[in-house]
Amino acid sequence: MAIATFDGVHRPLDVLIAGAGIAGPSLAYWLNRRGHRPVLVERMDRLRTGGHAVDIRGTALDVIDRMGLGDAVRDARTRILTLSAVRSDGRSTYEVALRQLHDGRGGREVEIMRDDLVRILFDAVAGDVEVVFGNAIRSVTQGETSVGVGFDRGPSREFDVVIGADGQHSALRALTFGPERDYARHLGAYLSIYTVDNLLNLRDQTMLYNEPGRAAAVFTVRGNARAKVVLLFRSGRIGIDNADQRAQCDLLGRRFTGMGWETPRLLEALDGAYDYYFDEMAQVRMPRWSSGRVGLLGDAAFGPSPMSGQGTSLALIGAHLLAHQLHSAPDVATAFDQWENGFRAHVIRNQRLAGDGLAVLLPGSRRGIAMRNQTMRMMPVLARLGSGFAGRLERASRSVTLPD
Ligand SMILES: Cc1cc2nc3c(=O)[nH]c(=O)nc-3n(C[C@H](O)[C@H](O)[C@H](O)COP(=O)(O)OP(=O)(O)OC[C@H]3O[C@@H](n4cnc5c(N)ncnc54)[C@H](O)[C@@H]3O)c2cc1C
């Protein structure tokens, strides 16, 4: 068994990880593999599912391969073949063959439903690490050689290190670093995603409809049995409660009133949706990702927003690099320092992609929509040439080196 040389003592580390999304189970996997004792605590009673398809690309795919999960992830990849941008009458303005696009990037990109990836990562650690569902960290008291953690339920416990992988609205960040408003930079848009029956009878297809500042998209999932609806709108920050689904649905109703194409039907279907996700498009930017023995990882520390398409890849790579440092550095402070020094430039580069993503998915004007359509038509060529957004994304996704 691998043993850490840590704070001058040779022993496995007890690491508490809050959040069983993407980053949490990934870090637990790597720590467990190196002989440490991670404990995962997830606030929900079971894995939190829902959400869009997420991309794993570039170096993040190498991490997945190192975890031995390459086949499972590729088997679960989405089967969407085409993206069609439509007019209000449903006629298509252009169509992009997505599989060709991915192949044009040398196959270094896998699109997978977030639910499926969460399940695959969790299965890779279930049975090997302690997992606590339905509980959360209430207090953190840092000492010289350990951290005392109080929970919503059950007795307090001591850990060597505590990591918050608890997402964009991280509670551990609020406890240790201060309120979310100090770190979350609003990107000027809101996103909702929910699953409905395949109302439009699509076949392995995504349809995207834009009006200035508003977008509605639908794509098929689960062998075309169901469809995911994506609604996006531009807006300054709205004081809306993250947990108030009724208020969010009312807001969507108001924002999408009068929108053309199939949008009224998609809105109507919100009532009977199988799952539901709503959040502001925000980017988490922190001057430092750790304080003493407490660190943050994934969206909690550096969420780039879905507009960058890189949140999942950053979480996967970040977890691998952090586990490497916690295992090999001589003490906690050095581990966190070296992790940040080696990873921050990659994060910044990928966070910058969010502006491109917003312009592509949610143009703010008719001219913007026309320009986006023009670019999309050239997408396969741009991808082959490695230029435009496709090229920037590809280069950013590989701008970090993994340890041997
Ligand atoms: C429901 C959902 C849908 C999403 N949909 C998309 C999408 O469509 N497109 C996209 O690009 N990105 C999406 N994301 C974000 C994407 O998953 C992340 O960018 C990325 O994968 C990084 O993962 P993460 O593990 O840091 O955070 P997340 O995947 O957000 O996972 C955080 C986990 O922490 C848990 N948690 C929260 N608070 C606490 C707490 N106090 N204590 C313990 N556990 C806690 C959450 O329940 C969740 O399981 C979604 C996230 C969620 C939660």
Image (cartoon, rainbow, N blue to C red):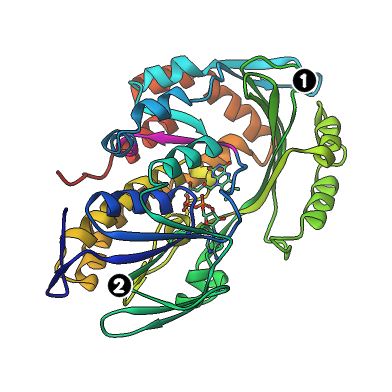
Above or below residue 27? Residue 213 is: above
Residue 346 visible to the viewer: no
**Quadrant assignment, res 115:** top right
The quadrant holding residue 229 is: top right
In the image, is residue 211 part of the stretch drawn in magenta? no
User: Which residue is label 1 attached to?
Assistant: 200
For label 1, being within 8 Å of ligand 1 is answered no
Q: Nearer the viewer, residue 112 or 303?
A: 112
Crowdedness near tag 1: few (<14), some (14–19) or many (≥20) residues, C-alpha within 10 Å: some
Front residue of this view, candidates 52 and 305:
52
Give the structural element (helix, strand or loop) at label 2.
loop
Mark 2 neighbour density, 10 Å: few (under 14) some (14–19) many (20 or more)? many
Q: Residue at horizontal 38%, vertical 18%?
A: 104
* Residue 244, quarter of the rendered image: bottom right
Residue 178, placed above or below residue 268: below
Q: Is 38 left, or right, of 153 in this rendering?
A: left
Query: What amino acid is found at the position of numbered circle 1 in the picture?
Result: Leu
Look at the image and tell me in which quarter the C terminus lies. top left
In the picture of the structure, the residue carrying the numbered disc 2 is: 160
**Identity, as a three-letter code, of the amino acid under mark 2:** Asp
Q: Is 240 left or right of 182, judged from the image as shown?
A: right
Q: Earlier in the sequence, mark 2 or mark 1?
A: 2
